[in-house]
Amino acid sequence: MTEQLTEERQTLYMNLIDQLLHCPNGQEPDVLDAHRDLIDAGLVQAMTQVAAYFAHNDNPDAAKFLVHVARELAKELGLYPQL
């Protein structure tokens, strides 16, 4: 991937994360379904980075939410070890 494509993808990830954080409770699956093309390891990584930022900047609820969604997506993608 070129650097520009990577930057564009990061922007798309951040926009999707923003949509997830601001959508009505329970609508998260619909938001994700509408952006299936963005659901990959890069999105999981972006979510964990944003969650870490929130955790260190006094927004623990958003951090917990993103970690939860990232974990579920990682399981769905086969990236998370099944215990």
Image: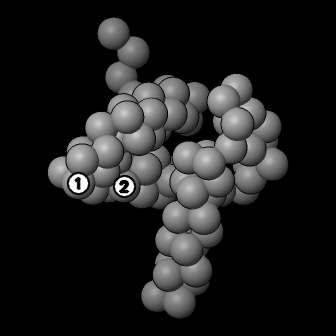
43 sits left or right of 23 in the view: left
Q: In front here: 62 or 52?
A: 62
- Residue under circle 1? 57
Q: x, y percentage for residue 38?
A: 65, 56
Tag in front: 2 or 1? 1
User: Circle 1 sits in a helix, a strand or a loop, which is it?
Assistant: loop
Q: Residue at x 56, y 46 (%)?
A: 21
Residue 59 screen position, x and y as percent? 31, 45
What residue does disc 2 label?
A: 50
Which of the labelled discs sits on residue 18, or is there none? none
| Quadrant where the image shows the C terminus | top left
- Whole-angstrom CA distance, mark 2 to mark 1, is 10 Å
Q: Is residue 77 above or below residue 15?
A: above
Q: Residue at x 23, y 54 (%)?
A: 57
- Identify residue type, mark 1: Asn
Task: Characterize the local packing of mark 1: few (<14), some (14-19) or many (20 or more) Cα atoms within 10 angstroms.
Answer: few
Question: Which is more toward the observer, 73 or 27?
Answer: 27
Query: Horizontal and vertical percent for residue 40?
Result: 56, 50
Quick one: SS at disc 2?
A: helix
Identify the residue at the far left of this view: 56
Which residue is depicted at the point 35% across and 40% down?
63
The amino acid type, in three-letter code, at marker 2 is: Val
